[in-house]
Image (cartoon, rainbow, N blue to C red):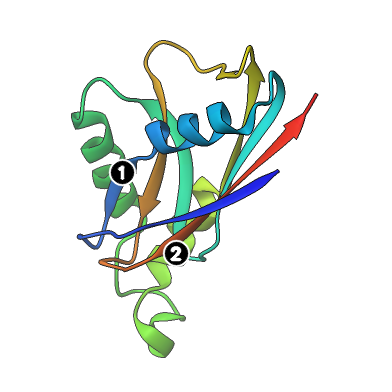
Amino acid sequence: MQHTFTINTSQRMEIIDINRKVEEIVTNSGVKEGLCSIFVQHATAAIVINENYDPNICLDINDMLAKLIPQGKWRHDQVDGNADSHIKAAIIGPSETIPVKNSKLQLGRWQSIMLCEFDGPRSERTITVTIIKG
């Protein structure tokens, strides 16, 4: 079973909690046990699982990535000026897979699924959720 949805972003770099939307998809799927894969269909965005309680974590992640992978010093920047976005997305990765049990994502207490935007703002970042029945 597969479901696709879109997210609009408003900043060049931001991390958006999409956990509630993914949980809704899992619940509506009717799958009791299995796997849930979340995949972003873009080369300058990523999916991550991290803490959902303190919003400073997301800011800290973006600050660290900006320091490690600065803008404007890469060969690809001669093409369209967003090489740092591609590198950040490649390091974080486009997908995560989470076990499903009793129709619920098996995330830890403070974990959430998040979209990482590295080249925004963008309209309609496409996210595909695939649920595999166990």
Question: What kind of residue is marked 1?
Answer: Ile
Depth check: 23 or 125 in front?
Answer: 23
Please state, as top left, top right, bottom left or bottom right, where the C terminus lies in the image.
Answer: top right
Residue shown at 20% from the left, 30% from the top: 55
Depth check: 107 or 80 in front?
Answer: 107
How far across and how far down the image is residue 90, in percent?
A: 54, 56
Depth check: 78 or 121 in front?
Answer: 121
Residue shown at 38% from the left, 65% from the top: 124
Residue, disc 2: 44
For marks 1 and 2 on the same chain, the one whose residue lies earlier in the sequence: 1
How far across and how far down the image is residue 101, in percent?
A: 65, 14
Residue shown at 47% from the left, 32% from the top: 24
Q: Say which mark, if any, is on residue 118.
A: none
Residue ranking furthest to the bottom: 79
Q: Is residue 96 left or right of residue 78?
A: right
How far across and how far down the image is residue 123, in percent?
A: 32, 68
Q: Nearer the viewer, mark 1 or mark 2?
A: 1
> Is 66 situated above or below 38?
below
Report how far apart the C-alphas of labels 1 and 2 lie in the structure.
14 Å
Q: Secondary structure at mark 1?
A: strand
Specify few, some or many for label 2: CA neighbours under 10 Å numbering under 14, 14-19, or 20 or more.
Answer: many
Q: Quadrant of residue 104?
A: top right
Residue shown at 37% from the left, 74% from the top: 82
Specify few, some or many for label 1: CA neighbours under 10 Å numbering under 14, 14-19, or 20 or more.
Answer: some
Q: Say which mark, if any, is on residue 16.
A: 1
> Is 48 situated above or below 124?
above
Q: Pointer 1 and pointer 2: residues touching (CB < 8 Å)?
A: no
Q: Is residue 49 left or right of residue 9?
A: right
